[in-house]
Structures are given as C-alpha cells and as structure tokens.
Image (tube, rainbow, N blue to C red):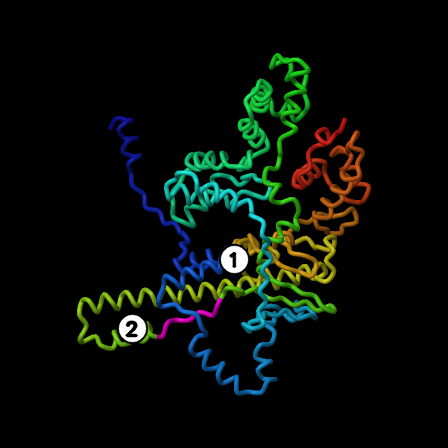
C-alpha cells in the first residue's frame, strides 16, 4: 500500500473516548441565577414568576400555616422563642462560634425595609432612556442593555468582551460573537455623555474628541492619540512634534484640547462613594450594639411562597381517575404537573438562595469581626474567596456569586461585599497583613507628595521597605494602578 494512502486511512481511523463532564440540571441553573441577583432584582424576578405561573402563590406553606395557628395560642414567651436566633452551630465547630449572636429576622413584621434610593437619575437609567430612541432589533436591544449594565461608575466597559459573550450565552441562551458585541457597543458609544462605554482611556478621549467641533487642533489631537498615545502619556513631545510636523504652538493647543476632556465620563453621576450608596438596596443589615453583632437578611419584596392548593388538588383528582381519562384530560394533567413542578422548583431555588446568602455573610462576619465592631478599615484581615468557601462548605464559584453585586449596611456605612476581600502579604517580622494596608500607605504618601516633584514607584518601594513591608517595585506599581493613580510623571505639575 502506498505510504500516502496508508497515512490517509490511519487518519480516518475511529477512536472511542470516555470523558467525564459535569452537566448542571435546570434546577441547579435556576438556583445559580437566583443567587446572582441582588435584592432589587430578586424582588422583580419573584413578581414575574407569580404572574406567569398560576400554580405559585404568596403565603405560608399550608403545613406551616397550621403550625403558626397552633403557636398563636401559646404564651407570648413561647412565641418569642420560636423566632429566636439562627445559630452558627448548625455548621460551625463550637470553637468557631463567637460570643455574639448572628440572627435572621424571619418574622415578617420585624423585617427591615431599607430603601436608600434618591431622586437622582442613575447613569444606567440615563443611557437606557437614550437607547429607547434608537432603532434596534429585540435581540440587539437586550444585548445593549446587558452591555450598559456592565459599564462601571467611571463610564468604562472594562470587562473582557469574550467574558461578556459567555455570560450572555449562559443567561439568555443567545449565541453572540465578539464582532457583534463590538458593533452594538459602537451604538452605545454614540450616546451621551461623550466617551461612555470606552474600554480604555485612549478610546475614551478619542470618542470625546470625535464629538467635538471639527477643527485642525481636534484632527491633530485625534491623530496623536491614535498613533502616538504612548508617547503622549510619557510626555515625549519632541518626538510627537517631529513625526506630526507641528510647531510648539500647535502642540500646546492640542494638549489644551485633550486636557479639557473628561477622563471619567461617568463621574457626573458618581462624584462620591456616598452618592453611589444612596442608590443601593442592601442585601444584608449588620448592626453592632454593646459588642454584639446582629445580622439581618434583607428580605423585603421576598414573600412567603407556596403551591396553589387548587392546582395540587386538581392533579390528585386527575391521577385518581385514570380509568376515565381522555386524551384531553391527559394533556391537562401534563400541563398542571409542569406548572406544579416549576412552582416547587422556584420555591426551592428562592429558599436555597436565602440560606446561601445567610451562611456566607455569617462567615464573612466571623472572619472580619473586628471591622464590624470598630469600623476601622485598617483592621480588615486578609481574606480571599477560598477562606469563605472552606468554612461554609460551598464551592468558590458560589461564594463569588454571592459576593458579586451584593451590599451590606453596617453602623459605619454601606459596603459592597467585595470590599471585605483582599490578598495578604508579610511584613519583615513575618506578620501577615492585608494588601489593603499597603494600598492605604501608597495613597497617603501620594496625597502628601510635592506635586512639582511627585514620588516615584521606586520612592514608594523604599518608603514601604523602611516601614517593614518587603515589597517589590513592580508590586507597588500594580497596587498604584489598582488605586487608579497615574505614574509620577503624569502627576507632575508645572
């Protein structure tokens, strides 16, 4: 047999392989999606489900309802005991249980309704309002709304486009590629404020310049930012003048044009952390009183749910009358059963969501006890997702979903759950501290610097080393960038 033909036949040889793949059930997917929703969105999700599924209704489960009627005849002290604290002992060792109590207020009359909205229009609302005036297909509209939801408080879309495409495919089943996303993003970037939806500073500035009146200066400024952005950020003006063939007067006019732009186009809607928090409905309320910490899961808008008794009785009647079932009756049985299964699955998903949120937040409080007692940011301990996952028994991805888009109200303000997570580093003496402490020192040193001679990353590294924090210059640069602080030469003032 010729070698080429033999090779061809070998390539066509079939092989059987066994691969173990984990597939999520529809119920698991529903639970995951419910877990990701913050307080306001879960309220809307439950309302929609109540409207769409007649087998689901508000109210205590019938068995629990009878227990409640029975308990109402008991003494007031017994009634009070029935609403007592949810103990951490259910899943923690005795050594892990702190002296204080963590409670979930389950009595509906005692639930706190904390709504901290103000009358100001949010950036997302403003963008969505403009989006209504554009001609988009239903699919493009949904995708653009999702993109807007990922724009951060500075007005940037900093998430990777491939990650956004994966999220859309997971949540809505829409198969979309990065090219389509980029096309829709361009539509959003045409909205006000100028520069919105940019993926980096370079794109943000160019978008703003393109919306300005076209002059020789704006044309040159766009060309400079497009072709020589790195040289511009490094202030290599001589090289820019030479390559663009411009004089110093033109260069200064271009720089004035650029420095008049807004590097954070979303800042008008978010001048301070306080403004952001005023638009937040917290998912948790943590109160501290005389050294005792109390946790409340904010269950506003989450009513007790139960199966509609008429539907369950209907299914029972149908199934008990098998002898007289017609094709129409069997079709009705299938319909009723599907609605009942969907209702029960939804109830289970809501219950699982609440239990997971409660348990995760309890663990965060245990790990960050000192902060919740004092409110001192410097007292925050290093904590990563794995630390919480190990104590709760949840998967790291589950803890990540709880931490995303969730907020907690404390005696000292409202914080996103991500605020409590940070990596660790060691001091010269071997003490483990949070990287948050390092960032705080960097920020304090830069705030106090001489703006005519700002401190460099090398200077900051030396300062930190003197204080006992053995840290490399590249790590200092990384933390400075995470703080949103530019390099020293960009902070220099004439």
Q: How many marks?
A: 2
Residue 218 disc label: none
Question: Would you name the residue on which mark 2 appears?
Answer: 315
Q: Earlier in the sequence, mark 1 or mark 2?
A: 1
Question: Would you name the residue on which mark 1 appears?
Answer: 40
Residue under the image location 76 percent in, 50 percent down:
430
The x and y percentages for residue 56 are: 39, 67
Q: Quadrant of residue 407?
A: bottom right
Task: Judge whether 242 appears above or below 133 on screen.
Answer: above
Q: Quadrant of the N terminus?
A: top left
Left or right, 463 with reference to 311: right
Q: Residues within 10 Å of mark 2 (few under 14, many from 20)?
A: some
Report the magenta residues as a range: 303-309
Q: Say whether residue 306 is magenta.
A: yes
- Can residue 375 be seen from the camera position used here? yes
Query: Toward the viewer: 387 or 362?
Result: 362
Task: Judge whether 326 appears above or below 171 on screen.
Answer: below
Callout 1: SS: helix
The span from disc 1 to disc 2 (Cα, nearest Å) is: 34 Å
- Can residue 199 be seen from the camera position used here? no
Q: Residues within 10 Å of mark 1 (few under 14, many from 20)?
A: some
Left or right, 412 with reference to 131: right
Q: Quadrant of residue 319?
A: bottom left
The x and y percentages for residue 485 are: 69, 37
Q: Quadrant of residue 396?
A: bottom right
The x and y percentages for residue 120 are: 58, 49
Query: Toward the viewer: 455 or 216?
Result: 216
Residue under the image location 17 percent in, 75 percent down:
324
Residue under the image location 54 percent in, 35 percent down:
198
Query: Toward the viewer: 36 or 10?
Result: 36
């Amino acid at each position: 047999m010729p070698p080429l033909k033999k090779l061809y036949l070998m390539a066509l040889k079939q092989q059987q392989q066994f691969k173990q793949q984990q597939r999520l059930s529809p119920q698991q997917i529903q639970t995951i999606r419910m877990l990701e929703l913050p307080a306001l969105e879960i309220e809307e999700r439950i309302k929609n489900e109540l409207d769409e599924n007649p087998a689901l209704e508000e109210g205590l489960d019938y068995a629990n309802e009878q227990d409640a009627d029975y308990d109402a005849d008991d003494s007031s002290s017994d009634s009070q005991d029935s609403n007592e604290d949810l103990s951490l002992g259910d899943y923690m060792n005795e050594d892990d249980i702190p002296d204080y109590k963590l409670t979930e207020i389950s009595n509906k009359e005692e639930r706190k309704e904390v709504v901290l909205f103000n009358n100001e229009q949010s950036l997302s609302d403003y963008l969505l309002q403009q989006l209504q005036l554009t001609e988009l297909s239903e699919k493009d509209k949904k995708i653009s709304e999702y993109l807007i939801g990922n724009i951060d408080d500075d007005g940037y879309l900093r998430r990777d486009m491939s990650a956004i495409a994966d999220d859309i495919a997971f949540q809505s089943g829409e198969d979309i590629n990065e090219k389509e996303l980029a096309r829709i993003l361009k539509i959003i970037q045409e909205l006000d404020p100028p520069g919105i939806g940019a993926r980096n500073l370079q794109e943000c500035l160019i978008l703003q310049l393109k919306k300005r009146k076209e002059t020789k200066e704006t044309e040159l400024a766009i060309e400079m930012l497009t072709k020589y952005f790195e040289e511009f950020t490094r202030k290599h003006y001589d090289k820019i003048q030479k390559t663009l063939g411009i004089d110093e007067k033109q260069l200064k006019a271009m720089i004035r044009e650029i420095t008049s732009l807004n590097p954070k186009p979303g800042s008008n809607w978010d001048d301070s952390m306080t403004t952001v928090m005023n638009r937040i409905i917290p998912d948790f309320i943590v109160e501290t009183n005389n050294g005792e910490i109390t946790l409340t899961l904010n269950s506003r808008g989450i009513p007790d749910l139960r199966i509609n008794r008429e539907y369950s009785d209907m299914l029972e009647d149908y199934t008990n009358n098998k002898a007289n079932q017609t094709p129409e009756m069997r079709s009705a049985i299938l319909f009723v059963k599907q609605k009942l299964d969907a209702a029960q699955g939804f109830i289970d998903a809501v219950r699982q969501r609440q239990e997971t949120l409660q348990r995760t937040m309890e663990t965060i409080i245990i790990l960050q006890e000192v902060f919740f007692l004092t409110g001192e940011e410097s007292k925050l301990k290093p904590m990563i997702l794995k630390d919480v996952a190990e104590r709760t028994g949840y998967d790291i991805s589950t803890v990540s979903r709880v931490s995303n888009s969730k907020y907690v109200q404390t005696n000292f303000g409202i914080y996103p759950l991500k605020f409590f997570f940070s990596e660790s580093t060691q001091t010269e003496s071997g003490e483990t501290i949070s990287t948050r402490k390092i960032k705080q020192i960097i920020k304090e040193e830069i705030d106090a610097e001489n703006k005519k001679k700002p401190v460099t990353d090398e200077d900051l590294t030396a300062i930190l080393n003197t204080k006992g924090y053995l840290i490399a210059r590249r790590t200092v640069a990384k933390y400075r960038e995470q703080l949103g602080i530019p390099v020293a030469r960009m902070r220099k003032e004439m």
